[in-house]
Amino acid sequence: MLLKVNSTTNRLIVIVAIIQILLYIADVTMFIGKIKSSKIYFNITSVLLEILFLITGYYLISVLAFFKEQRFITAAFVIYIALDLVRNSPSLHIGIPEFSSGITGILYFLNFFSKIYILIATLNIKSAYLRFPFILYGCVLFIAGLANFAATFLYSFVLSGDYRSGNIKTLGTIISYTNMLWLITLVAVVILIRNINRFIAEQKAQVAVS
């Protein structure tokens, strides 16, 4: 069952987006400022961000269905969200380390290619109300994913994962900065909501005139 695309839902998603923005800024600020957080804080914010991400993704899927966009476009977001959910599943971090690491690596690659799929899919959106914010979302998602992918590849294969050299800290810093790009995807969601509110207002005005 999809979310109802209306003014009430839009207001809820704006709040969800703002909370995500604040949490991301707080996390990145703490990392850059070398401010240590408790394990409880880390676990709570990680779970909260994942839940908010899923809500936002579910809303995007609902919007695509509401505007009757092509199914392969909706499928791109379904696959991306499903892979992210599985990749962040606690079960992958329990058990045999080598097995969990291998599965996580495969999911990481699949997640990156799902971002390429999203970029291609968003370029095929027809609705003028959706086109710009979704393309912005897809482009930023791809650029951030590419930067993270390149940094991780450099660390894993070129630097051979040398924890002693301090390279892991450099990798963390790069990923932390590129994750800031994720904030632009949330801005894209807010722009999308503004466009949908305009669409709803126009529809109501047409009904009133008729």
Image (spheres, grey):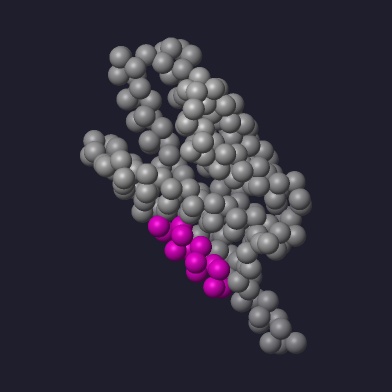
Q: Is residue 52 above or below residue 205?
A: above
- Image x and y of residue 29, in percent: 29, 43
Task: Report the span colored magenta.
Answer: 7-19
Q: Is residue 204 above or below residue 81?
A: below
Residue positioned most to the front = 95
Is residue 127 something one can see in this rendering?
no
- Judge whether residue 202 is colored magenta: no
**Which part of the image, by quadrant, shows the N terminus?**
bottom right
- Among the 4 quarters of the image, the one containing residue 133: bottom right
Q: Is residue 191 above or below residue 35?
A: below
**Which part of the image, by quadrant, shows the C terminus?**
bottom right
Looking at the image, which is closer to me, 55 or 148? Answer: 55
Is residue 172 something one can see in this rendering?
yes
In terms of secondary structure, what is the magenta stretch mainly?
helix
Residue positioned most to the bottom = 209
The residue depicted at 47 percent of the width and 32 percent of the height is 93
- Image x and y of residue 152, in percent: 46, 24
- Image x and y of residue 96, in percent: 50, 23
Left or right: residue 206 versus residue 198 is: right
Labels in figure, total: 0
- Among the 4 quarters of the image, the one containing residue 129: bottom right
- Among the 4 quarters of the image, the one containing residue 204: bottom right
The residue depicted at 30 percent of the width and 14 percent of the height is 164
The residue depicted at 42 percent of the width and 51 percent of the height is 48
The residue depicted at 52 percent of the width and 39 percent of the height is 89
- Image x and y of residue 104, in percent: 54, 28
- Judge whether residue 9 is colored magenta: yes
Left or right: residue 69 versus residue 112 is: right
